[in-house]
Image (tube, rainbow, N blue to C red):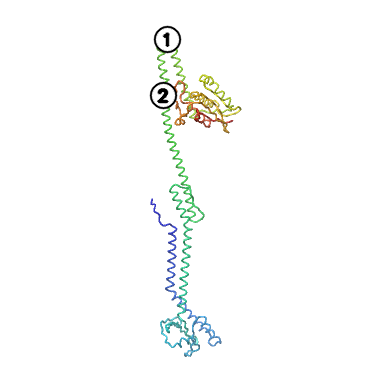
Amino acid sequence: MSNKKGLSIRFKMFFEISAIILAAVVLILFINTRYLDDIYLYNKKQDMQSSAEYINSLDILSGIYFGSVKNLETEKNCSVDIFDKDGTPLYISSKIINESGSAARVVDTQELKNGTVIETHEIEGKQYLLLKSGLSFGGEVEIYCYKGDVDANADIALAFTWFSVLFILFASLIFAFAYTKRFTKPLIKMSGITEKMANMDFSEKCSANSRDEIGRLSESINNLSVSLDTTLKDLNEKNRRLCDDIEKKQTLEQLRKEFISSISHELKTPIAIIKGYAEGAQLMIESGDGKGAKEYCDIIEKESDKMNALVFELLELSRYELGDSRLDLDDFELKGFVEDCTASEKLMFEEKGIDFSCDIPENIICRGDSVKLAMVLNNYVSNAVSHASGEKKIAIRSEDKGGFMRLSVFNSGENIKAEDMDKIWNSFYRADKSHSRKEGRFGLGLSIVSAIQKLHGMDYGAENTDGGVIFWFDISKA
């Protein structure tokens, strides 16, 4: 697309209108300059003929005949001579012209209707119009007019025309500029808005105040802007969802691979141990060593229990994630709930030298699936026991958040690394690679916590603090 910008439509329109006005002015001035004298002269001749017809309509025997003729001379600024049919002067007014002593030279002759003749005489450089017309009683009338007066009137009219036309031209140009500015303002506005639309900016809208084509065009551009904006947002949202779906698919595929790898690893070791000890027990039975065989069978039973626990946790997690597990909601007292969950762990706290504390207010009634929530708390406590170090402190606290309670389990020890914080909720993920399998942890506990909390529609999480780590989860109030 070319970035070159031509002349603005406002100035184009102004120049075009100005050119039309100027052409009209030039045409008017040309016609007036070329034909105004002829028009004035033609009108004067018609006026002289009308005067002759007026005189012919008068009654010569009337007492006001000559007074009417004199009044006509004053009104028309002309001289009138009237002659009898034998040439005898009856009324003479142009004697000044005749007494000049100079011979008149006929410059032009024109015959009008009814035998009327108009001659142009030149006397001492001055031209006069002379109309000769017969009268009804047989006489003749001659009417003289000074042609210079006609030319002077034509010149005055031409000068006034020039002045008027130039004034109108100037005023018209000002009006044309104001009109084009007003007319093209919405078009220029639309042009700027459509340029923004081309750059995917739909924030500005046209002002559609009129009901004409420009107003309808403004409304159409606004509708197009809204439609494009909506379509683009919808397209971006679908594109974002598609990217998220692709990313989730890739993540799920990676998790699937990791899950298969992890479960294969978790099952491979106990199966190998069971096979080895089973072979050893068989040999001991054959050799008659019943005591040794019994010890081997105890180890086989212990590893089988671990495998059974792993399969149970996998089935439980699968049920939660697939939505096959239903919540059995009930109301319970929070402090009693926590005490019941931790009662079986007190002996372990004493054996490992853990300083355990619990600060839960009384008479707080919560609502949820208490059995599944107990699994959440037990997983947190078991995780805390496994990771407690240093001062070996474990503390359970609650915080009122309005519509729900936030239950937290703190254990002293090392903080969780930033790169592990989001991964600890994944199946089989263990940040502490140094801990051995003999603790019976498979990396599924926090995944089960995540699934149970999602079933309840409540939040959960973990955060590092000074000297330890806090795991928390929310329980709805009754």
User: Can residue 45 be seen at all in this image of the molecule?
Assistant: no
Q: Residue furthest left?
A: 2
Q: Earlier in the sequence, mark 2 or mark 1?
A: 2
Does residue 6 sit above or below 300 in this rendering?
A: below
Q: Nearer the viewer, residue 404 or 137?
A: 404
Which residue has dot 1 on it? Answer: 289
Say which amino acid is labelled 1: Asp
> Dot 2, crowdedness within 10 Å: few (<14), some or many (≥20)?
few
Query: Residue 84's spot in the image, x, y percent?
Result: 49, 89
Query: Residue 81's spot in the image, x, y percent?
Result: 48, 86
Does residue 296 sit above or below 88 in this rendering?
A: above
Marking on residue 265: 2
| Image quadrant where one finds the C terminus | top right
Marking on residue 396: none
Q: Nearer the viewer, residue 326 or 276?
A: 276
Say which amino acid is labelled 2: His
* Helix, strand or loop under label 2: helix
Query: Total label count?
Result: 2
> What residue lies at 46% left-to-right and 65% top-to-bottom?
170
> What residue lies at 41% left-to-right and 21% top-to-bottom?
269
> Dot 1, crowdedness within 10 Å: few (<14), some or many (≥20)?
few
Query: Residue 78's spot in the image, x, y percent?
Result: 49, 82
